[in-house]
Amino acid sequence: MIELTGKQKKHLRGLGQKLEAQTTVGKEGITDSVTKNISDLLDKRELIKVRLTGPSGEARKEIAPALAETLQAECISLVGRTVVLYRPNPDIKPSHKINING
């Protein structure tokens, strides 16, 4: 797992608010294809927003951290049906790298 400070998480939450949801986790939950799709998106963008359309309120609270753990990412925020995930990629171009220190 990634160790982020409170200040870094706050900065990433701010960046995440401006994002559009790139993918959706439906009623089937975390499938292999969903996991691969989200992993590919994290490799390209480092910070993504995912819409959780299928699960109910309590299930979303369990799915978001499980998804982050499966992807070795950090769950930055979970608001309603939207989760923001962050996973640094050392191989990404410097111009596309997310500056986590604001």
Image: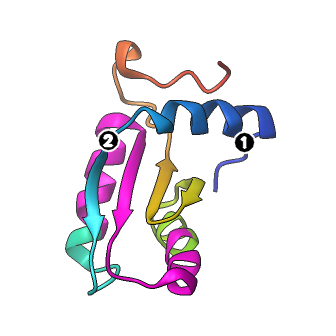
Where is the N terminus found, in terms of image quarters? Answer: bottom right
Closer-to-camera residue (1/76): 76
At horizontal 27% and vertical 64% (from top left) the residue drawn is: 24
Asked if 100 appears above or below 26 in the picture, the reply is above
* Three-letter code, disc 1: Leu
69 to 5, vertically: above or below? below
Distance CA(mark 1)–CA(mark 2): 23 Å
* Structural crowding at the residue carrying mark 2, measured as other residues with C-alpha within 10 Å and reported as few (<14), some (14–19) or many (≥20): few
Looking at the picture, does residue 29 appear above or below residue 23? below
Give how far across and how far down residue 19 sits, in percent: 38, 36
Residue 12 image position (x, y, % from top left): 59, 35
Q: Residue at x 57, y 85 (%)?
A: 58
Q: Is residue 15 magenta?
A: no
* Mark closer to the chain start, 1 or 2: 1
Q: Residues within 10 Å of mark 1 (few under 14, many from 20)?
A: few
Q: Relative to 95, does residue 17 appear above or below in the rendering?
A: below
Q: Position of residue 33 (x, y in %)?
A: 20, 72
Residue 59 on the magenta span:
yes
Q: Quadrant of residue 5?
A: top right
Magenta residue span:
35-64
Q: In which quadrant will I find the C terminus? A: top right
Q: Residue 26 sits in which quadrant? A: bottom left
Q: Cβ–Cβ below 8 Å for labels 1 and 2?
A: no
What's under tag 2, amino acid-wise? Answer: Glu
Q: Residue at x 72, y 42 (%)?
A: 4
Q: Which residue is mark 2?
A: 20
Element under disc 2: loop
Chief secondary structure of the magenta span?
helix
Q: Residue at x 58, y 32 (%)?
A: 14
Seen from the viewer's position, the closer of residues 47 and 53 is 53
**Residue at image mark 1:** 4
Q: In the structure shown, which secondary structural element does the residue marked by tag 1 occupy?
A: loop
